[in-house]
Image: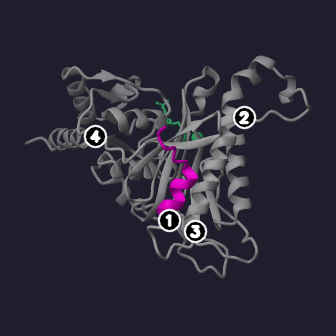
Amino acid sequence: MSMITTLDEFIIRRQKDFPYASGELTGLLRDIGVAAKIVNREVNKAGLVNILGVADHQNTSGDTVQKLDMYANEKLIDCLKNSGECCGIASEENESFMPLEAISEKPSKYVVVFDPLDGSSNIDVNVSVGTIFGIYRRLSSTDEECQVTDFLQKGTELVAAGYVLYGTSTMLVYTTGRGVNCFTLDPSIGEFCLSHKDIKIPNHGQHYSVNQGYYLKFDVEMRRYIDHCSDMGLGLRYIGSMVSDIHRILFQGGIFLYPNTRANPKGKLRLLYECNPLSFVVEQAGGKAINTQLDRILDVEIHELHQKATIAIGSPDMVDEMKAFVEKYSAPMAP
Ligand code: AHG
Ligand code: MN
Ligand code: MN
């Protein structure tokens, strides 16, 4: 029988590689794993809740039925609050960040950022959604509450990041800057088990991923690159939940694009909650992530919690090729 490694065992084993580790990061990753299992349970029930068609947003027990993204948000906050391993959180669903109180007067040195449910418009039609998270070391003193500056750090400062995909299987993928590993939830034992070790993204893939419906709203250089993808015979895959598209690209290669449009001149996706954590994962797997100004995503300065970004992310050769197209076609015309 092959040996099973659970997420908890793996995290603890990895902690031993860091002689000065205090166990806080280990605890945080485990808490995120627990929250993921709770959210997973509700995501799986979502269809059923709709069938039961509860009037006035009340379920049969009289509880208020929440939107699933708000539910996921609350569960993540609860798990992180109770753990005492983090001093503050910032969520895509909340306007501002939230300082958390220390438990047993043990101050924490980490803050967590997350998109509780990515692709939430897909829930009603039973298409995969996910949770994205990132962990930063706080910059402020542990004598005071965490500050907004603890969250406004470039992606290069991420200590850990990952995502949970609630798909045909539920998978948790994360990195602490030493490769990317994937754990699949075994529902029979309720544990995330190591299923894909040290994932490496293919240099090239057979698909490109973009909302082609906005084609006419993209800049000319982006349209040229998209035409090129089509000319090369690449297939188009676009799920509408970034985490699902990135998961496919991580395993099969490809490129995901969310450029600026006329409606979203700075892009639509959020740097802190979506682009940075997923860029860290993809880079750790050997991929690349840049914006349409061709800056590396992880190097982009962040000035506000909900700052938007454009993004091209995926197989290294494809991101390089896209960069070459943008350089070529956005060059000023000769007089
Ligand atoms: P969220 O559900 O967290 O708001 O994110 C949705 C995001 C992303 O997951 C997806 O790739 C993108 O929005 C889809 O946007 P379009 O419908 O504009 O293509
Ligand atoms: Mn999202
Ligand atoms: Mn979301």
- Amino acid found under the numbered disc labelled 4: Ser
Residue 110, picture quadrant: bottom right
* Mark closer to the observer (3, 4): 3
Question: Which residue is at a point 60% across and 60% down the rendered structure image?
Answer: 28
Q: Which residue is mark 2?
A: 67
- Amino acid found under the numbered disc labelled 2: Lys
Give the position of the C terminus as an image quadrant. top left
- Amino acid found under the numbered disc labelled 1: Gln
1 or 2: tag closer to the N-terminus: 1
Element class at badge 4 = loop
Element class at badge 3 = loop
Circle 1 residues within 10 Å: few <14, some 14–19, many ≥20: some
* First to last magenta residue range: 1-15
Q: CA distance from mark 3 to mark 4?
A: 34 Å
Q: CA distance from mark 2 to mark 4?
A: 35 Å
> Where residue 57 sits in the image (x, y, percent)?
83, 29
Q: Residue 273 vs residue 187: left or right?
A: left
3 or 4: tag closer to the N-terminus: 3
